[in-house]
Image: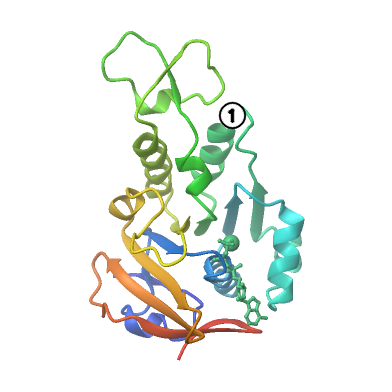
Amino acid sequence: MNRTKTGIEGLDEIIQGGFPKNSITLVSGPPGGGKSIFCFQFLYEGIKNQDKCLYLTLDKKVEGLLAQAKELGFDFQPAIENNQIKLLYLNINKKLVYEKMTNEILSGEFDRIVLDSITPLSEMPIFIKNTGENNPDISMIDSGDYSEGRNLPSRRLHLQFIMNALESSNSTSVVTSELPMGSSLLSRDGISEFLADAVIKLSFDPTMDRRKLSVMKMRNTKHTLKPQDMVIESDGIKLV
Ligand SMILES: Nc1ncnc2c1ncn2[C@@H]1O[C@H](COP(=O)(O)OP(=O)(O)OP(=O)(O)O)[C@@H](O)[C@H]1O
Ligand SMILES: [Mg+2]
C-alpha cells in the first residue's frame, strides 16, 4: 500500500511507513494537546515532498496561523508564494461556507488536506431545503437559507458531508477534533471517529508533565495501541 509520510519523528515507524494514501486521519486532543502543530508538521513534510497542500481552518485567521507555525520553525511563506500550499480561513457564519470548502477539497489539486478543526462545523445547525421528499439529498445542504429549511439531525449530516468530500478528493487528509481535558472520547462529536479511516489521540498528564500519542485506529495498518511518549519541542512533535 502507498503511504504518506506524516512528518512526525517516530510516528511513521509504528504505522508501517505513514498514513495510507487517500485516507482520512482524525487527530483529537485537549486544548494545547498539539493538534495544530501536528497539522503543520504534516503539511511541512508534504511541501518537502513536493506535495500540493491545503490548510482549512474555521476558527483562526490565516495570519495568526502562519505566525504560530513560523514560531515553531515551519515557515510556510515561501511555499505560499510558490503556490505549493493554500491556507484558507472559512467563516462559519457566512453563507456558502460549504460550497467554498467543498470546491477547494474537490478541486483535485491537493495531495494533502488539513481541516483544523472540524468541531465548529459539527456544532452548527443544519438546514436542508424542503424538497417534499422523505430522504433529502445530502448535497442539498444550504447553511444560508433558513426560511425554507427544516432542522434535521445535524451532526452526522455535517460530518458525513465533509468526510465524503475528503474521501472523494484523492488527497491524504488530517482532520482535528477538540476534546475536553481528560476526556475518554475519541472525538468531540462522537461520530467522526467512525467516519475517519484512522484516529490518533493526543493527551497529556499535567502532574507528570508528560504527553502521549495513541494510534487508536488505522485501517489497513498493523499498529500498536500502546500510548507512545511524545514531546513538543522548539521544532515540533516527536515520539521518544
Ligand atoms: N516552542 C515550544 N516548545 C515546547 N512546547 C511548545 C512550543 N510551542 C508550543 N508548545 C506546546 O504546544 C501547545 C500548543 O500546541 P497546539 O497549538 O498544536 O495545540 P492544539 O491542540 O492545536 O490546541 P487548541 O485546541 O487550543 O487549538 C502549547 O500549549 C505548548 O504546550
Ligand atoms: Mg489548534
Residue 172, image x, y percentages: 43, 60
Query: What residue is drawn where x is 65% and y is 61%?
Result: 84
Q: Position of residue 231 (x, y in %)?
A: 52, 85
The answer to whether 51 is drawn above or below residue 49 in the figure is above
Residue at 26%, 15% in the rendered image: 134
Q: State whether residue 76 appears in this view.
A: no
Mark yes or no: residue 220 visible.
yes
- What residue type is disc 1 on? Leu
Location of residue 20 with respect to 175 vertically, above or below: below
Q: Position of residue 184 (x, y in %)?
A: 33, 64
Residue bearing the label numbered 1 = 96
Graded by Cα atoms within 10 Å as few (under 14), some (14 to 19) or many (20 or more), the crowding at tag 1 reads: some
Image quadrant containing the C terminus: bottom left
Q: Is residue 203 above or below residue 126?
A: below
User: 1 or 232, which lies in front?
Assistant: 232
- Residue 20 image-quadrant placement: bottom left
| Ligand 1 sits in quadrant | bottom right
Name the outermost residue toward the top: 132
Whether residue 163 is situated above or below residue 75 in the rendered picture: above
- The N terminus - image quarter: bottom left
The response on whether ligand 2 sits within 8 Å of label 1 is: no
Q: Residue furthest front?
A: 207
Residue occupying image coordinates x 53% and y 34%: 98
Residue 232 picture quarter = bottom right
**Which type of secondary structure does the marked residue at label 1 adopt?**
loop
Q: Residue at x 25, y 72 (%)?
A: 221
Instruction: Find the residue positioned furthest to the bottom.
Output: 240
Count of numbered tags: 1
User: Residue 224 appears in which quarter of the rendering?
Assistant: bottom left
Q: Position of residue 191 (x, y in %)?
A: 32, 48
